[in-house]
Amino acid sequence: MPPESPFSPPALPAEPLPWVESTLLAAQPRRHRRRRAIVVTGVVLASLGLVAGAFWGISVLAVQQKDLAVAVLRTAVDEQAAAQKTYDARARYGASLAERAGSVVARAEFNADTTPDAAHFRLAYETIAALDDETPEDNGAGAAIARADDDDSAGYRPPWEVFTEAAADRDLTHDVVHDRDALIAAAKEATDAQDWVDDTEAAYFSAVAARGTSDIAANTLATKQSQVALTRLIEQADDPAMSTSRDGAFLSSFVAAENALVASQAAEAAELADPALAVRREIEDYARSLSNEMTLDFVWAPEVNGKGEGWLSGTAETYQSDGGWAVITLNYGVEEDWGLDENPRALVAHEVGHAQAHRPACSALFTGPVFGSDDEMWATAWSISLGFDLPGSGIEAYGRPSDEQIAVAGQCR
């Protein structure tokens, strides 16, 4: 057996020492702490994942709410724009209508009218004149939409900012819808007021037209010229398509035409009653006897075509409207020489002949190849065809027509 080394380990006891067992037992829990650390780390990571997922979900929700709010705002803005366009059109027409109606109501001729139609028209005008302008102020909706379009390309933004903007857009939509509804209501109010003005204006001028028609029927001695002038205005007053031309100036013209008609009636009646004008009445009656029922007006003047004392002179203005009529102007020489010879009668026949050329039964003869619409040769030939082969028929002034022309003019009876 080798000798015992001074460095040999001591022999182990048969039973473990208490402190060794305690040390071994105390070392065993270290494995459990490592497992707990792993679990805690997993829980933290899972929690972070949940938070991140929740944050992502909130971000998505915020964007969805923002997109929805902007979409609703866009629709509201489009509807407001359409309502504004409708209102603006109504407002423009209303302004024009109010101006025109106001010019009528302001006239003295209208204020002298005490009929119910005038009262209703005035009330309708006052209603439309009192309407307020309903154009809303800029509510910032357009800027909000433009900002939203810019935000789409601006990248990520915190959800709380997006939620705040979505809420602001919803509030703005409320304002836009309020403005839209106000415009729609204002347009309807304007439409109702305008319709009332249109209706009462038409009724008023229809009554004015009826009054004018009665005036013509009651003033049969008035000249055709005064009757025709009033007739044209009656047609305008009674035509719905001409309402835009019926302003204050038109009403004054209408009343002036009525007054002219009445004045013409009075003048004609006075002349009929004046014995000093008996020769004129005889000449006028003679001319009408040749006119084949064409209406003739007469004007007497000291000079006609520059011819006065010592001359026989006349003119004729012919109109094809209103059944055909003419205005014959004669100088005083015709009256003074009436009955001395046949020349004054020949001249009167010449002037009536001008009017006859435009009768339906004679116009083809006048415009045909024999005359070619030669006014003076036609009138002279027509006078000669009545037996006035005299200087006063027009021969002195225009020459003698051919026998063929005289024969053709003679067919106009």
Image (cartoon, rainbow, N blue to C red):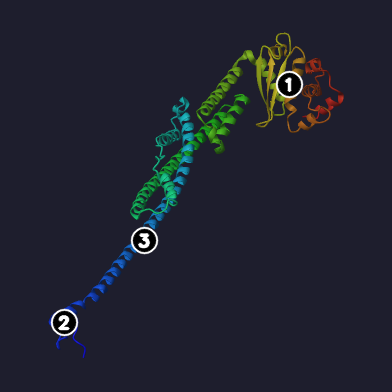
Label 1 Cα neighbours within 10 Å, binned few <14 / some 14-19 / many ≥20:
many
Residue 349 at x, y percent in the picture? 75, 21
Residue holding disc 2: 21
Residue 193 at x, y percent in the picture? 43, 40
Residue holding disc 3: 56
Seen in the picture, residue 339 relative to 232 is either above or below; the reply is above
The quadrant the N terminus occupies is bottom left
Q: Mark 3 or 2 closer to N-term?
A: 2
Q: Nearer the viewer, residue 239 or 10?
A: 10
Tell me: 397 left or right of 43: right
Q: Nearer the viewer, residue 409 or 197?
A: 197
Quadrant in the picture for residue 274? top right
Q: Mark 2 or 1 closer to N-term?
A: 2
Q: Nearer the viewer, mark 3 or mark 2?
A: 2
Q: Mark 1 or 3 closer to N-term?
A: 3
What distance separates the C-alpha of mark 3 from that of mark 2?
55 Å
Q: Amino acid at mark 3?
A: Trp
Q: Amino acid at mark 1?
A: Glu
Residue holding disc 1: 351
What distance separates the C-alpha of mark 1 from that of mark 3?
104 Å
Find numbered disc 2 in the image and state the secondary structure of the residue it sits on.
helix
Is residue 362 in view?
no
Label 2 near label 3: C-beta < 8 Å?
no
Q: Amino acid at mark 2?
A: Glu
Label 3 Cα neighbours within 10 Å, binned few <14 / some 14-19 / many ≥20:
few
Label 2 Cα neighbours within 10 Å, binned few <14 / some 14-19 / many ≥20:
few
Is residue 251 in view?
yes
